[in-house]
């Protein structure tokens, strides 16, 4: 297992949400919305962890830290930005 992937499994839910939010902020200032793939890359996770990353994004949305970039996009094209973006 890669180092960052090991860290992901050791993180608490709150730490994962914070990491998702901060990743979203960093990407936003670079004019890039995040998606499942970019967050998996941040955590060094493979495609088999897509569902876990989706849960983290959903939890981050529920708290209100991130939001959909385009609410009319189909699910496959969902991108996210910080709540203040």
Image: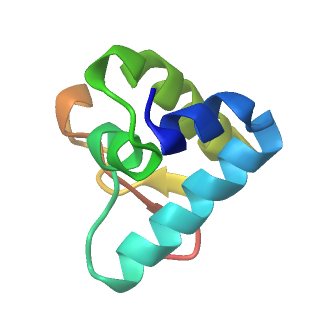
Q: Camera-side residue: 29 or 1?
A: 1
Is 27 situated left or right of 14 in this image?
left
Q: How is the image coloured?
A: rainbow
> Is 51 drawn above or below residue 4 in the view shown?
above
Extreme residue in the bottom direction = 29
Q: Residue at x 37, y 72 (%)?
A: 27
In x, y percent, where is residue 17?
A: 68, 47
In x, y percent, where is residue 80?
A: 40, 54
Q: How many marks?
A: 0
Is 11 situated left or right of 41 in this image?
right
Quarter of the image for residue 8 reads top right
In x, y percent, where is residue 62?
A: 68, 39
Q: Camera-side residue: 80 or 19?
A: 19
Residue 82 visible? The answer is no
Q: Which residue is drawn at 45% across and 26% down?
A: 1
In x, y percent, where is residue 19?
A: 62, 56
Quarter of the image for residue 55 reads top right
Residue 52 visible? The answer is yes
Q: Which residue is drawn at 45% across and 76% down?
A: 26
Is 20 situated left or right of 31 in this image?
right
> Is 55 drawn above or below residue 21 in the view shown?
above
Q: Which residue is drawn at 70% across and 56% down?
A: 18
Q: Camera-side residue: 31 or 48?
A: 48
């Amino acid at each position: 297992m890669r180092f960052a992937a090991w860290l992901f499994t050791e993180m608490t839910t709150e730490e994962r949400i914070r990491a998702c939010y901060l990743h979203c902020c960093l990407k936003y200032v670079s004019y890039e919305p995040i998606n499942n793939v970019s967050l998996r890359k941040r955590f060094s996770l493979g495609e088999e962890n897509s569902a876990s990353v989706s849960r983290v994004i959903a939890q981050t949305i529920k708290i209100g830290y991130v939001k959909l970039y385009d609410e009319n996009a189909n699910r496959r094209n969902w991108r996210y930005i910080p709540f203040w973006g």
